[in-house]
Amino acid sequence: MAALDPKAMRQANAETVLGTLYEHSVVSLAQLTARTGLSRRTVELILTDLDERDWIQTHPPDPQATGRGRPARLFSFRDDAGMVLGVDIAHGHCAAAVADLRGVELARRVLPVRGEPGRAERLALAREAIAQALGAVGLRPGQIGAVGVATPGNVDDQGMVAVRLSMRDWMGVRLGAEFAADFDCPIHVENDAKLAALAELREGATPGADHMLWLMLEGRNNGLGIVVNGTPFRGVDGAAGEIFWAKALGLDDLMTSPLIGLGRLQPESRRAEAAALLARAHTGDPAALAEVHRFAAILTRALSTLSWMMAPRHIVLGGSLTWAFGDLLTTTVKALLTDAPPFVTVHRSALGDSAVIRGTIRTALDHFDWTTTTPVRLAPR
C-alpha cells in the first residue's frame, strides 16, 4: 500500500477545517475538533497557519460564556478573504459583478449595448463594465480569485461559442482565452441559461432541486437550462437546451403575439403597445386576457412536450418576458399545463433579471481555489 503524501494530507486536513469554518458562523477549537474528527493539536496548527495567511478571523472569548477553565477563543471564516467576478455578455447589455466568498455582491455595473456592435466593440464594453465594478470596491484584476462568464449560444467543450446567433461576429469567440490576459485565475465560460439554472438551483425558487427545466424566455432567442440529478446538464459539446433550433416546439409562434413586445430587445413602439395590452389584461379586459391565454397556450404546448421528455420535478419560467408579465404568465401556464406529468410544478424565477449574473457568481465560486489564491483586504469605504 502506497504511503500517504504528508503534504497532501496536511492540505486535505486544512481544507476540512476551512470547509467547516465556512459552514458555521463562529466556532471554538473544541467544536472544530469534534466536527472535523481531527486531533486538537492538528486543528491548532491549521488554525495558526490559516490565521497567519489571513483566511480566518480570531475572536475574543464570549464574555457571557460560563463553565470551568479559560473561556474558549472563537474562530470564523473571512468571507472577504477572496473575491470573485461574474460577467454577463448579453444581446442588449454587458454586466459585471464583484462578490465575496459567500456570493454577496459588493458592486454591480450594467452597461447597455447600443446598436449591433461587432466582437471587438462588445468585448471592450464588457471590459468597461468589469473595470467599473472592480473600481467601485477598489480592487485590481489580480485580486480576483475566479471569474464566471455567461454568453448566449452554446459553449462547446473547448470553451468556444459554436452556434451562430444574433450577436454579430460572435460565433467562434473563445471568451476564456479573451480574458486570460486580464486575470490570473480560473475563468469559466458557460451558456447564460445554464448559469441561470445554476443560480436558481442554489438560491432561487427551487433550492437543491434534483430535476428542473429553467426556461429563458426572451422572445425568439429562447434558451433552456436543464438540471439532472441536481447538476446542470450540458449534453454533447454543451448543446443541451439550445431550443432556439428546436422549431418543432413551436415557440416561434410567440412572435405572432403583440405581447412579444414585452421582450427587452423589442422596438420602443412595440414595447409600449405590449405594455398597454398587458395593463388591460391586469384590469380584467376580456380581449387582453384572451391574448395572454393565447400566448401562454403556445408556451404550454412546448412545455408539455419538454416535460414528458425530461420528466422534471420543476419548470421555472425566467427571462425578460417572464419578468415583464409579473405573475400573470406563470399563473396562466399553471392553469393550462394539464397534460404534463402529475409531479411537475411550475414556478416563476425568484431571481428576475439577476438570474444570469447570479449564475456567473455561483460558477466562479465553484471554481475558486483558496490554495492558490492570496487573501485580499479591502480598504475601508
Image (spheres, grey):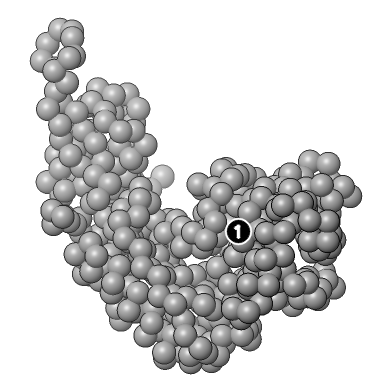
Instruction: Name the side, left or right, on which 54 lies relative to 280.
Output: left
Instruction: Name the side, left or right, on which 288 lies relative to 267.
Output: right
Residue occupying image coordinates x 21% and y 33%: 75
Q: Nearer the viewer, residue 214 or 228?
A: 214
Q: Nearer the viewer, residue 150 or 297?
A: 297
Image coordinates for residue 14, horizontal then vertical, percent: 27, 43
Image coordinates for residue 183, horizontal then vertical, percent: 30, 74
In the depicted structure, whether residue 30 falls above or below residue 351: above
The amino acid marked with disc number 1 is: Trp
**Quadrant location, the C terminus:** bottom left
Residue occupying image coordinates x 18% and y 9%: 66
Can residue 361 be seen from the camera position used here? Answer: yes
Instruction: Name the side, left or right, on which 28 lies relative to 221.
Output: left
Residue occupying image coordinates x 20% and y 42%: 56
Q: Nearer the viewer, residue 146 or 34?
A: 146
Q: Which residue is mark 1?
A: 323
